[in-house]
Amino acid sequence: MLICRVFVVTPFAQNCRLLYDSESLEAVIVDPGGEATRLLTYINDNGLTLNSIWLTHSHIDHCGGVSQFYREFDSKISGDKPPLFGNKLESEMRGRIGDQAKMLGIPGGMFENCPEPDEWLEQGTLVELGKYSFKSLFTPGHSPGHIAFYFENPKPGVSGNEGNKWQIDWDRGEMPSESGNSPLLIAGDTLFQSSIGRTDLPGGNHAQLIDSIKNEILSLPEDTKVMPGHGPDTTVYAEKSSNPFLK
């Protein structure tokens, strides 16, 4: 089973996700925006092996905790440092986390510059977690190099396939646990429940964001579970039907 543990971290209430294969106990973290100790405690307590870190984008709330996470990982866990995956268009953003903090009125020291990725993500890049494979979708607009991660779970019964069961748990019970076998999309800050990502930050582009949502996300199967970077999950069908920003 694919397990998704959601950690709502930092004052930004950002949804950091720890994904792992319940059989192999291989894990990845998506967008460690902060609270490294909390994440590492869960990894240790559950015997997980972290094989990589994936970034949807490089705003302060999504990548400002990567450096701290690596420091604590080195001190608490034996083994190789998990590689960082991200898009090369956001190199300047990763090196200016302090400037982002000043712009948002955040005290210095809470977030740090993010190291450059070890592996680049672009449209169509496949990233692996145990027996599961996620496809990178290039979804700019909220930020210039934004990536979403799509798990195309086969429908049960198609060619004898039973589908891959997944389970979503919220670390402090912010939302109910849920299980299913629909496709999954880790959407970052592109699409939210009844809303869309903001585009008033440096590198934002509203028309580009709408194109990304309509071409890359709303074209996915309607039962796709959309997991945003903030707030509750939704589905492609729900946002197609009622999102006021997409009319």
Image (cartoon, rainbow, N blue to C red):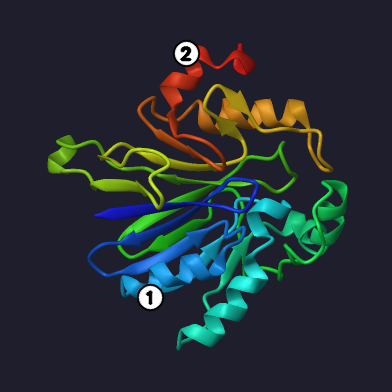
Q: Quadrant of residue 159?
A: top left
Question: For the C terminus, which image quadrant?
Answer: top right
Query: Residue drawn 39% across and 28% down?
Result: 221
Residue 175: numbered disc: none
Find the distance from the CA under tag 1 to the CA under tag 2: 42 Å
Query: Residue drawn 83% across and 61% down?
Result: 98
* Callout in the foreground (1, 2): 1
Q: Percent from the top left, x then y, of residue 81?
A: 53, 81
The residue beneath circle 2 is 241
Say left or right for 120 vs 234. right
Foreground of the two, 54 or 44: 44
Residue 44: numbered disc: 1
Q: Residues within 10 Å of mark 1 (few under 14, many from 20)?
A: few
Foreground of the two, 105 or 32: 105
Q: Amino acid at mark 2?
A: Ser
Q: Residues within 10 Å of mark 2 (few under 14, many from 20)?
A: few
Q: Percent from the top left, x then y, of residue 205?
A: 78, 33
Question: For the N terminus, which image quadrant?
Answer: bottom left
Looking at the rendered structure, the secondary structure element under dot 2 is helix
Q: Percent from the top left, x then y, of residue 175?
A: 39, 38
Query: Residue drawn 35% across and 38% down?
Result: 183
Q: Percent from the top left, x then y, of residue 73?
A: 53, 79
Foreground of the two, 154 or 182: 182
Q: Amino acid at mark 1?
A: Asn
> Is residue 118 visible to us here?
no
Q: Are marks 1 and 2 in contact (CB under 8 Å)?
A: no
Query: Residue drawn 48% across and 65% down?
Result: 39
Q: Quadrant of residue 21?
A: bottom left
